[in-house]
Image (cartoon, rainbow, N blue to C red):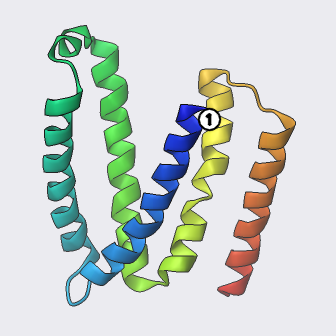
Amino acid sequence: MNTWVAYAFISMFFAGFTSVIAKKGLVNISGDLGLTIRTCFVFVFVLVFAWFVVPHKEWALLKTPNWLWLGASAVTTTLSWIFYYKAIKMGDVSTVALIDKGSVVVAVLLAFLVLHEAVTVPKMIGATLIAAGLFVIARGQG
């Protein structure tokens, strides 16, 4: 197995915990406050991580396009998190997390359009199955 595949599965594992733990932390507070507190912790943890893991000389490699694209990614992450926390506060984490995974379909499409990544048959089948699953979930909520 490629290292990046292992990292992706580890990410998936922790992401699954994240939603359930967050829902427990939202008891008696708004999703907005919960998101704010969580993000403060994430900020500190990532800074500590970067201090120990990112070689200091690598910071000099940053160019304007890096800042712009990563800044745009931060905007979309923020918007995703705002609406995700509103959704898990009001709904079932298991349903919200499933719908959120529809982002895979968006990522496959954008990776093709923006990054010119290949859309293989396995990717198309996987994205189609995810889209079908979203349809089943949406119909079940009506």
Percent across and percent down for residue 28 are 21, 90
Name which residue lies at 19% across and 9% down.
Answer: 60
Q: Is residue 28 left or right of residue 69?
A: left
The amino acid sitting under disc 1 is Leu
Residue behind mark 1: 110
Above or below, 140 against 3 in this view is below
Instruction: Report the label total.
Output: 1
Q: Is residue 83 left or right of residue 128?
A: left
Name which residue lies at 44% across and 60% down.
Answer: 15
Residue 32: which quarter of the image?
Answer: bottom left
SS for dot 1: helix
Packing grade of label 1 (10 A; few <14, some 14-19, many >=20) is few
Find the residue positioned furthest to the front. 1
Q: Is residue 130 left or right of residue 95?
A: right
Name which residue lies at 41% across and 77% down.
Answer: 88
Front residue of 4 and 99: 4
Above or below, 49 against 131 in this view is above
